[in-house]
Amino acid sequence: MSYLYEQILSAGISEGMGVLSTKGRDAGRVFMVLRVAGRRLELVNGRNRSLSRPKIKHQRHVKPLGHILTATEVANLLNSDLVEREKDIILRKQIEAFLDEIKFDGQEMTDAKGRSD
């Protein structure tokens, strides 16, 4: 794979990437990109947006944060023999571990109601 092609792929939003919602009633919440369909993204967080009921959002309404899981790890999670509830628990733990690694100007991430994720 050429260096230029890798840069083009990494510049866009891809599956397994963590994103911060910037618009809508879920603004300020962190989601993981489940699927990319053109400019539309299917977002999940394991709490109010489970793997069985993803949020569809336009890519200009989110801010990319970095990769939570790789595309193969996302596929393995979706194809595993676990119950949907167990998959959502794993997803929540992955997002929490990702948020522990990053910092936002020294502030803790909170949702729209002031609760920390």
Image (spheres, grey):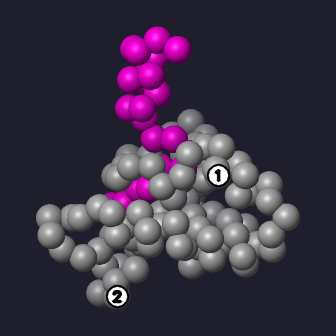
Residue 70 lies within the magenta run: no
Where 59 falls versus 103 (above or below)? Answer: above
Residue 53, percent from left and from top: 68, 68
> Are discs 2 and 1 less than 8 Å apart at CB?
no
Give, as a single range, the part of the protein colored magenta.
1-22
Q: Secondary structure at mark 1?
A: helix
Q: Residue at x 73, y 78 (%)?
A: 85
Badge 2 crowding class, 10 Å Cα cut-off, few under 14, some 14 to 19, many 20 or more, is: few
Residue 38, percent from left and from top: 56, 36
The amino acid beneath tag 2 is Arg
Q: Left or right: where does residue 112 sit relative to residue 95? A: left
Where 50 falls versus 71 (above or below)? Answer: below
Q: Left or right: where does residue 42 sit relative to residue 106? A: right
Q: Left or right: where does residue 18 sit relative to residue 107? A: right
Checking the image for residue 115, the label placed there is: 2
Checking the image for residue 112, the label placed there is: none
Badge 1 crowding class, 10 Å Cα cut-off, few under 14, some 14 to 19, many 20 or more, is: many
Residue 16 lies within the magenta run: yes
**Quarter in which the C terminus is drawn:** bottom left
Which-is-in-front pick, marks 2 and 1? Answer: 1
Q: Which residue is mark 1?
A: 74
Where 60 falls versus 115 (above or below)? Answer: above
- Toward the right, the furthest residue is 81
Residue 32, percent from left and from top: 51, 58
The amino acid beneath tag 1 is Val
Residue 111, percent from left and from top: 35, 79
Q: Quadrant of residue 4?
A: top left
Where 11 falls versus 57 (above or below)? Answer: above
Q: Quadrant of residue 36?
A: top right
Q: Residue at x 38, y 32 (%)?
A: 11
Mark closest to the chain's N terminus, 2 or 1: 1
